Image (cartoon, helix red, strand yellow):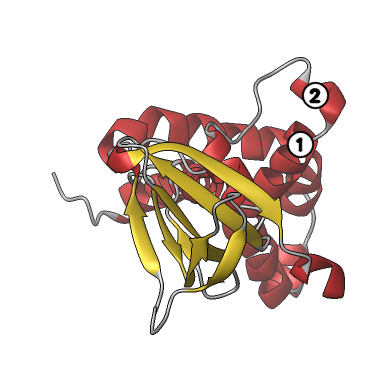
């Protein structure tokens, strides 16, 4: 079987590529467990068909007009939109709807873990991490800090490590500290305190 046969290639592009683009775009916006691309084939075909169903009317109008003969460039541009741009647009629209409180009362939130929800907002915080042995690690989560996202294991990099006083407050930055990385396997809890940096922005 020649997979590069023109008819097979057209069918592949038409019924797999749009859905595959939608799946990968959604995975970027709402991280989840990794799934092999080969196992997403049925989903890709289904999403491609849904894409055509939504755009059925404009597709019908274009295909039953003389656009392909009189305006070939416009015809190619239209189908490029249908195949590659529209699937991305539907994903952004669907995610936008899922973030509405009313929609969330009907279906689960698109972000699966509180870790991704909090750090995905990209805000600045003062953070106190309590480890399983009771030790506390404090620091600033700022613009140069980083937190992993699903499906990767939760890890956090604080760009500034701070020492706590006897009352548990932030006393001063650790000398010569370039930050600290904390692994999720050692974390018992994470406390967040507003840094005030967001208000300045």
User: From the viewer's perspective, is residue 169 above or below residue 45?
Assistant: below
The one nearer the camera, 191 or 39, is: 191
Q: On the rendered image, what quadrant is the C terminus found in?
A: bottom right
The one nearer the camera, 149 or 200, is: 200
User: From the viewer's perspective, is residue 54 above or below residue 121?
Assistant: above
Please, which residue is most extreme toward the front here? Answer: 166
Question: Which residue carries the number 2 mark?
Answer: 103
Question: Which residue carries the number 1 mark?
Answer: 99
Circle 1 residues within 10 Å: few <14, some 14–19, many ≥20: some
Residue 107 appears at what percent x and percent y? 69, 18
Is 57 left or right of 31, judged from the image as shown?
right
Please, which residue is most extreme toward the bottom here? Answer: 176
Contact, mark 1 vs mark 2 (Cβ under 8 Å)? yes
The one nearer the camera, 155 or 168, is: 168
Q: Residue at x 76, y 73 (%)?
A: 70
Q: Residue at x 58, y 52 (%)?
A: 119
């Amino acid at each position: 079987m020649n997979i590069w046969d023109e008819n097979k290639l057209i069918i592949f592009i038409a019924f797999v590529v749009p859905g595959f683009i939608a799946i990968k775009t959604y995975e970027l916006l709402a991280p989840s467990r990794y799934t092999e691309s080969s196992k997403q084939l049925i989903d890709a075909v289904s999403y491609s068909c849904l894409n055509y169903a939504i755009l059925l009317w404009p597709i019908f109008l274009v295909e039953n007009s003389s656009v392909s003969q009189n305006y070939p460039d416009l015809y190619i541009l239209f189908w490029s939109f249908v195949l590659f741009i529209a699937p991305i647009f539907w994903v952004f629209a669907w995610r936008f709807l899922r973030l509405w409180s009313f929609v969330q009362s009907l279906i689960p939130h698109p972000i699966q873990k509180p870790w991704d929800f909090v750090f995905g907002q990209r805000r600045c915080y003062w953070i106190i991490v309590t480890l399983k042995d009771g030790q506390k690690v404090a620091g600033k989560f700022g613009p140069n800090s980083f937190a992993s996202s699903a499906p990767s294991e939760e890890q956090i990099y604080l760009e500034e490590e701070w020492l706590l006083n006897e009352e548990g407050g932030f006393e001063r930055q650790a000398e010569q500290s370039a930050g600290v990385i904390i692994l999720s396997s050692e974390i018992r809890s994470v406390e967040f305190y507003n840094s005030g940096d967001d208000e300045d922005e």
